[in-house]
Image: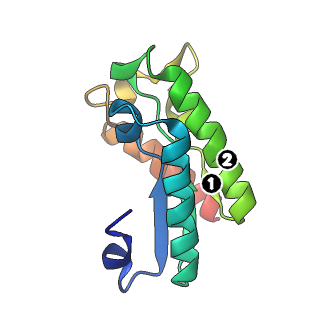
Amino acid sequence: MARLDDCARDADMLVVQGGINDIAQGRPVEVAALNLRTMVRRGKELGLRVVLVDVLPWNNGWPEAEPQIRRLNALIAEIAQDESVPRLPFHDTLEDPDHPGRMRAEWTSDGDHPSVEGYRKLGELVARLAG
């Protein structure tokens, strides 16, 4: 958040993604959500198109982090609605329906991040939503 203005210089769009790092570092999800809302508002003040992205499933944090991820994603949905910005449902796109709260093995490279196939699925989602 502290680097937003510098990072956004000469940008047309700001993509704000809910961070698993906040959860991994033990920050309260309400604080993480407040920071995300602040970044969304700042991006709008800067005249940028803003898109909000929810937190991915986290295989290596499952099941302990699952309640926090679900709560933060609910708050992210509220922020998107309140601030009238699109929300990209990355969590639901990569969540394994047979193992809720986790990505399919082929969609993650290390249990933390998407694999090439996982990023392909996210890219297809963005292309589909962009029309």
Q: Would residue 54 be seen by someone viewing this image from the given angle?
A: no
Q: Residue at x 52, y 37 (%)?
A: 29
Say which residue appears at 43% left-offset and 22% top-offset: 104
Name the residue carrying label 1.
87
Q: Position of residue 52 (x, y in %)?
A: 56, 57
Quadrant location of the C terminus in the rendered image? bottom right
Residue under label 2: 77
**Which residue, as the protein is rendered here, is positioned at the far left?**
110
Specify which label sits upstream in the sequence, 1 or 2: 2
Q: Nearer the viewer, mark 1 or mark 2?
A: 2
Q: Secondary structure at mark 2?
A: helix
> In the figure, 62 relative to 90: above or below?
above
Q: Which mark is residue 69?
A: none
Could you say which is closer to the camera, residue 28 or residue 100? 28
- The Cα–Cα distance between marks 1 and 2, rounded to whole angstroms, is 7 Å
Q: Coloring scheme of the render?
A: rainbow
In the image, residue 97 sits, relative to residue 75, either above or below, namely above
Which residue is drawn at the image coordinates 37% and 21% (left, top)?
61
Q: Identify the residue shown where x is 37% and y is 70%.
A: 4
Q: Residues within 10 Å of mark 2 (few under 14, many from 20)?
A: many
Tell whether 19 sits left or right of 60. right
Residue 128 falls left or right of residue 95: right
Report which quarter residue 105 is drawn in. Answer: top left
x and y percent of residue 31 in the render?
50, 45
